[in-house]
């Protein structure tokens, strides 16, 4: 199970953040008889970590290296090694962006989102907006976002769902502080429920604390299009994202799911955006064929399209409940296809 370049980079950055130089050098020497100082004499923490992970003259293969990290690393390094040893996704390629099963959930199509996530992880922008009318699968994006955050950016994805919360702007920002492990005592007291034009003190307090983030986070705010979300809260989320895009702090990216209002600010001109829509028969057929290719009986293109079309005709109207049923059904189809069992 060889590690590819993005995985090496993400894991090396994590090791360089979690271990000091003495720990990295000792780990390499004690477990692999590797003298990193001799290999990279002018190196720093990241250089040594990359050498440890990518030097193909090392006696152990990548599996042994990961198993050793899993056994001797701290909690964060152990978790990363475990994820790489036992990936919770089905990738048709070596890239995490292309995962078509994450956990047990199929992730069909969404090519535009995958393309925008590449820009997002390259830090060309710090804001991602996923929009579209209900229902279209926006919240369904969470698994892929979480997967890419960890595998490609060594970041912790933190979801904040607004459905059925009735937050005020201050309560919303309190939740943001909690998820990012920031001190809510830094938030200003507010005796009223501020309108969007008056949330500046909350945004300023938020920005003033971003230098205290101890690790990388992707803050994913969901359900912004839900009718129960107060307009002031929706605009507070937008204001936080705008501030992040303007200042580009080292350790924070923000995704807004369901923010359907027009975006006119010049500073948000280059953000990552996707207009989500649920997949059709052609997209599902491609997914089923990719899954079957990993099993003993690959589907032909025509047979995959036939199965996909029959599957979706069972749900002529794609309500949110129907989309959940389709997903459950496709999970079963995928599991059978991996075993070579065709409907």
Image (cartoon, rainbow, N blue to C red):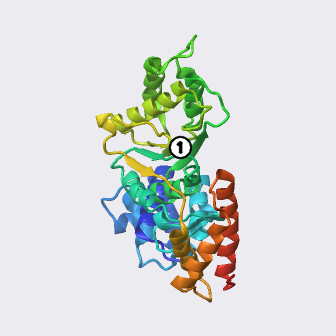
Instruction: Return the residue nearer the eye: 48 or 240.
Output: 240
Relative to 136, say whether 232 is above or below: above
Q: In which quarter of the image is residue 287?
A: bottom right
Q: Position of residue 2 (x, y in %)?
A: 49, 76
Instruction: Return the residue nearer the eye: 212 or 117.
Output: 117
Q: In which quarter of the image is residue 245?
A: top left
SS class of the residue under badge 1? strand
Image-based side of 302 in relation to 44, left or right: right
Q: Residue at x 64, y 61 (%)?
A: 316
Q: How many neighbours does mark 1 have within 10 angstroms: few (below 14), some (14-19), or many (20 or more)?
A: many
Q: In which quarter of the image is residue 183?
A: top right
Q: Where is residue 222 in the image (x, y as percent from the top left)?
A: 56, 42
Relative to 218, say whether 304 is above or below: below
Q: Which residue is drawn at 36% across and 49% down?
A: 123
Q: Mark 1 points at which residue?
A: 220
Quarter occupied by the C terminus: bottom right
Q: Position of residue 43 (x, y in %)?
A: 33, 59
Q: Where is residue 236 in the image (x, y as percent from the top left)?
A: 49, 28
């Amino acid at each position: 199970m060889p590690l590819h370049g993005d995985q090496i980079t993400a894991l090396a950055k994590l090791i360089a953040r979690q271990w000091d130089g003495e720990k990295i050098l000792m780990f390499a020497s004690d477990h692999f008889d590797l003298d990193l100082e001799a290999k990279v004499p002018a190196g720093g923490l990241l250089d040594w970590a990359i050498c440890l992970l990518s030097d193909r003259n090392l006696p152990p293969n990548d599996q042994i290296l990961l198993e050793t990290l899993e056994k001797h690393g701290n909690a964060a390094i152990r978790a990363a090694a475990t994820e790489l040893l036992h990936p919770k996704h089905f990738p048709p390629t070596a890239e995490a962006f292309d995962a078509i099963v994450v956990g047990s959930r199929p992730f069909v199509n969404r090519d535009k989102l995958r393309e925008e996530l590449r820009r997002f992880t390259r830090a060309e922008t710090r804001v991602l907006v996923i929009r579209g009318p209900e229902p279209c699968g926006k919240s369904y994006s969470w698994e892929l976002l979480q997967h890419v955050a960890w595998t490609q950016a060594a970041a912790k994805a933190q979801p904040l769902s607004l459905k059925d919360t009735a937050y005020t702007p201050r309560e919303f920002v309190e939740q943001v502080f909690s998820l990012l492990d920031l001190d809510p005592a830094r938030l200003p007291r507010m005796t009223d429920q501020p309108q969007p034009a008056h949330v500046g003190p909350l945004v300023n307090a938020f920005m003033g604390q971003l230098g205290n983030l101890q690790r990388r986070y992707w803050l994913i705010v969901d359900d912004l299009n839900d009718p129960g979300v107060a307009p002031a809260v929706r605009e507070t989320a937008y204001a936080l994202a705008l501030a992040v895009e303007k200042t580009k702090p080292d350790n924070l990216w923000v995704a807004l799911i369901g923010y359907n209002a027009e975006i006119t600010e010049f500073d948000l001109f280059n953000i990552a955006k996707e207009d989500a829509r649920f997949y059709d028969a052609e997209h599902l057929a491609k997914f089923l064929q990719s899954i079957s290719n990993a099993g003993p009986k690959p589907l032909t293109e025509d047979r995959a399209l036939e199965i996909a079309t029959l599957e979706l005709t069972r749900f002529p109207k794609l309500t949110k409940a129907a989309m959940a049923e389709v997903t459950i059904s496709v999970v079963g189809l995928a599991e059978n296809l991996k075993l070579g069992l065709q409907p």
